[in-house]
């Protein structure tokens, strides 16, 4: 069965974006980028892959899930199909139709859709964001890959949204961790079932 992996960048106080959805406060550069890109080249948007000359096949993921706000970030940067090298889904109850022919709209019951996707053959499923969607999909998240930046934002969009508390804690164990010279920590967690 395929795994759903929430692969995301966060500040040490648990924010993945500002209130308006901006992520430009995350520093670009440093030694963490090339190492993580080499391992997960499919997590770069298609336009960035092309600009960098990355033509590797997908190693870990072949499917990406995005919430509407995460997808809107791509639209603001000029693309409605940000990960053309992956099978793309956007989860939204407010979009009347798919924003792009290459992107499938999930307008109802994202948990049921994820369970269906997990039963298919293929590589992993990447939950790209955002926090509200991660909270909804938490029962099906098998892994969390966290790029933890050594900064405090103070407020913004939370790693797991701001909805109601869960009745039971979802428990994970760390499977690997690496701290880079630039201070970014890359941690992989696996769910304890």
Image: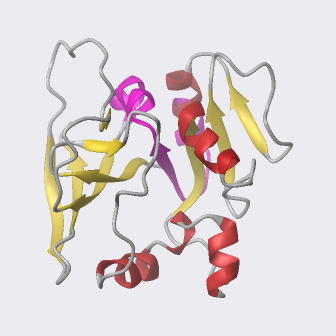
Magenta segment boundaries in residue numbering: 115-140
Residue placed most toward the observer, 167 or 54: 54
Residue name at image x 56 percent, y 17 percent: 109
Q: Which quarter of the figure has residue 36?
A: bottom left
Q: Report x, y in % for residue 47.
A: 69, 69
Q: Residue 31: within the magenta?
A: no
Q: Please determine whether, in this image, residue 127 is positioned above or below residue 109.
A: below
Looking at the image, can residue 1 be seen? no
Q: Which quarter of the figure has residue 163?
A: top left
Viewed as shown, does residue 55 lie left or right of 22? right
Count of residue discs = 0
Q: Residue 125: within the magenta?
A: yes
Viewed as shown, does residue 188 lie left or right of 105? left
Q: Report x, y in % for residue 149.
A: 22, 61
Residue placed most toward the observer, 185 or 172: 185
Q: Look at the image and name its color scheme.
A: secondary structure
Residue name at image x 37 percent, y 40 percent: 18
Q: Report x, y in % for residue 140.
A: 38, 33
Residue name at image x 31 percent, y 49 percent: 143
Viewed as shown, does residue 96 lie left or right of 65? right
Q: Please determine whether, in this image, residue 185 is positioned above or below residue 9.
A: below
Q: Please determine whether, in this image, residue 30 is positioned above or below residue 44.
A: below
Q: Which quarter of the figure has residue 180?
A: bottom left
Q: Report x, y in % for residue 3.
A: 43, 48
Residue placed most toward the observer, 128 or 152: 152
Looking at the image, can residue 174 be seen? yes
Quarter placement of the C terminus: top left
View extreme (right): residue: 101
Q: Please determine whether, in this image, residue 190 is positioned above or below residue 104.
A: below
């Amino acid at each position: 069965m395929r795994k759903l992996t929430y692969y995301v960048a966060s500040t040490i106080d648990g924010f993945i974006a500002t209130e308006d959805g901006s992520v430009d406060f995350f520093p670009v550069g440093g030694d963490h980028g090339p190492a993580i890109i080499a391992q997960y080249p499919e997590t770069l948007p298609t336009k960035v892959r092309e600009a960098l000359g990355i033509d590797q096949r997908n190693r870990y993921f072949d499917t990406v899930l995005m919430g509407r706000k995460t997808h809107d970030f791509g639209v603001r940067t000029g693309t409605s199909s940000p990960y053309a090298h992956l099978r793309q889904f956007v989860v939204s109850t407010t979009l009347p139709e798919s924003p792009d022919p290459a992107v499938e709209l999930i307008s109802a019951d994202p948990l049921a859709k994820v369970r269906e996707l997990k039963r298919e053959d293929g590589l992993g499923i990447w939950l790209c964001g955002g926090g509200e969607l991660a909270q909804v999909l938490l029962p099906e998240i098998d892994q969390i890959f966290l790029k933890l930046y050594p900064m405090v934002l103070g407020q913004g969009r939370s790693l797991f949204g701001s909805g109601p508390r869960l009745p039971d804690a979802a428990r994970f164990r760390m499977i690997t961790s690496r701290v880079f010279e630039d201070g970014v920590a890359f941690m992989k967690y696996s769910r304890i079932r």
